[in-house]
Image (spheres, grey):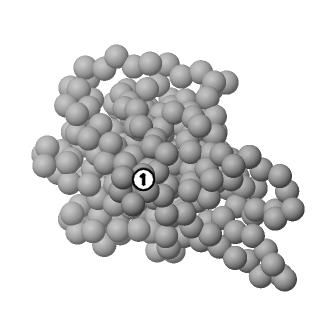
Amino acid sequence: MRIVYLANNRLGVEVLKLLKAEGEALVGLGLHPPSRRAFGDDLLEIAGLDPEQILPGESICSRETIARLRVMEPDMIVSILFGYILSPEVLEIPEVGCINLHPSYLPYNRGTYPNVWSIVEGTPAGVTLHYIDKGVDTGAIIAQKEVEVLPTDTGETLYRKLERASIDLFAESWPRIRDGRLDCLTQHPEEGTCHRVKDVERIDCIDLDARYTGRYLIDVLRARTFPPHRGAYFEVDGRRVYMRLDLQYEEDF
C-alpha cells in the first residue's frame, strides 16, 4: 500500500516501524515545523525518503502541498499525533482514505490532552483508530481499546499507558485495514466531549481562596503532573508556585 505518513512524537516513530516491517510503500512524510517537532530525526531516518518526499505539516493544506500529494498518488494517508487539520481537498486524495490514531476512547475527549481530561472529568480513557472526516476526531471508528485509569495515575503515567495501547491497537488492526476487512462504527458529533489546547488554562491556576472538593483538586494536580511540563500552580506575591503529585498505594510506600 502506498502511504503518506503524517506524524510526530515517539508514537509516530513506533507506528512507522510497524508499517515498514509490514513492507508498506512509504511515498511521503509530513512533519511538524522544527519548533513543534518531536522525534523528527528518528522519523526521517526510519522513513529513508528523498527530500522532495518530505512535506511541511504547517502548510499541508496549501495548494503547493496538495499538488505534491496528488503526484505521490497515495492509497492511504496515516496520521499519528499530527497537529494540523486536513482539508476536504486533502481528504479526497487517497483512494482508500485517511485514518488517524487518537489516544482517547472516542467519542470522549476529542481534541487535545485526552490523558488530562479522562482524569479530571472521569470520562473513559482509551485509544481509537478512526477515519478522518471534516470534523475533529469525529470520523467512523475502525477499532478502539479502553485503558483503566488507576487512583495513582498521573497525566504522565496515563499518557504512557495510552501510548502503549495505541501501538498495540495499530499492530492488531493494520492487517484488517490493509485488506479492507472493516466493520466501522459511525460517530455522532453531538455525543462525547471535546477539548482545545487552551482549555487546560482554566484548570491550571488554583485559587487559594476558592472552594474545591478534595477529589477535584487531587484530580487536577495529578492530571497535570507530567515532568518536565509545568502543570498546575498557585500564585503568591505575583509569583507562580508549580505543583506535582507523587501517588503510591499504601503497600508500595
> In the image, is 179 to the left or to the right of 154?
left
- Residue highlighted by disc 1: 250
Residue at 27% x, 50% y is 15
Q: Amino acid at mark 1?
A: Glu
Quarter containing the N terminus: top left
Q: Nearer the viewer, residue 2 or 202?
A: 202
> In the image, is 175 to the left or to the right of 64?
left
> In the image, is 107 to the left or to the right of 69?
right
Residue 68 visible to an observer of this rendering: no
On the image, the x and y values in percent for residue 111 come to 58, 44
In the rendered view, would you say 205 is above or below 61? below
Check disc 1: other Cα within 10 Å, few if <14, some if 14-19, many if 20+: few
State the count of labels.
Answer: 1
Q: Nearer the viewer, residue 1 or 83?
A: 83
| Helix, strand or loop status at disc 1 | helix
On the image, the x and y values in percent for residue 212 come to 77, 50
